[in-house]
Amino acid sequence: MSENRFLLPGEMAWLREPSQITTLLGSCIAVCLVDPVRGAGGMNHFMVPDLRTAGGMPPGKVGESAIDGLIQLARMAGSAPGDLVAEVHGGGAVVGPLGGGTGQLDIGQRNIACARARLAHHGIRVRHEDVGGSEARRIALETATGRVEARRIPRPADPAAGGTTARRAARVLVVDDSPVVRQLLVKAISASGDLAVDGEAGDPFEARERILERAPDVLCLDLIMPNLDGLSFLRRIMQFKPIPTVVVSTIAKAGSAMRDKVMAAGAHAAIDKEDLGLYQGGDGCQRLLLPALRAAARSRPTPPGAPAGNGV
């Protein structure tokens, strides 16, 4: 398999080499197109059905233009509409962290109707639909075989129910590529009494699914990781689903350009991992990390330069 591509809202891809394209959906729609003869395929991820609803969104987030754009990518790669078959996924009545963030109660149904109408307009047969309902979905397309796997994601507990007050410990997702560091951080957080570890992730790809499946209250995020660096992941998650984040990294030292970058990207705090003394008893966790995580859990992050509310 040559590539593993994950789509955020508004993105699309058409790949001719054996690859996997994945995305996560709430009220949004993913149209999967497959050319069975050429072993190629593609996917988009749109949020609203038409320009009337878009409110200035870029074309990739608007169903009418996103479907036309994906078909155009297929044409450029040598696949005519008559060569293609389609699947339509998503459009759930999802609220909370996995919702679409559009404020439209019927947005999922309108997205479904848009996908059906636009594909019919182009004469593309829909071989399968998995739409509606009240749960989010993880969609994975294998371009070589044309197989699409759709997995339902159980609705997470709403963090707003009970807040992060004394009635419920604030839940922390620990993201670090080192199993030893994760173990030490988990130990310190678990011993705090008012914070709880809600999972671990070894890289950003694993972290994004934990975030969307479990909706933790806070991220404890490393920067040097495989597959995608922590700064890039922070920037994407703050646009995709803002979550209070404490960066813990040896390259986020006080006064460094990297610390400035992570704070500008939306981090609540940045801590030099060396200051925690993880291998010398971890006293710095009590002084630095735990207070930062508590403060982050009480905060309401917004993506830099944009209002909160973007969803999947």
Image: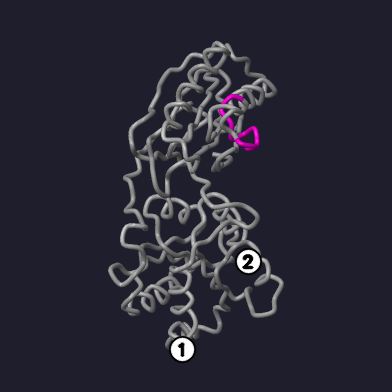
**Badge 1: few (under 14), some or many (20 or more) residues near its Cα, within 10 Å?**
few
Where disc 1 sits, the SS reads helix
The residue under label 2 is 262
- The span shown in magenta is 55-64
For label 1, the residue is 280
* Residue 119 visible (yes or no): yes
Q: Earlier in the sequence, mark 2 or mark 1?
A: 2
Quarter of the figure with residue 151: top left
Residue at horizontal 61%, vertical 26%?
70
For label 2, count other residues whose C-alpha is less than 10 Å away and answer few (under 14), some (14-19) or many (20+): many
Residue 199 locus on image (x, y percent): 37, 62
Which residue sits at x=46%, y=21%? Answer: 113
Kind of residue indicated by mark 1: Gln
Q: Estimate the spatial distance between the alpha carbons at disc 2 and disc 1, rounded to whole Å.
A: 27 Å
Compared with residue 233, is residue 144 higher up or lower down, i.e. above or below? Answer: above
Q: Nearer the viewer, mark 2 or mark 1?
A: 2
- 221 or 59: nearer the eye? 59
User: Which of the numbered marks, if any, corresponds to residue 169?
Assistant: none
Image point (38%, 50%), residue name: 213
Disc 2 is placed on an element classified as helix
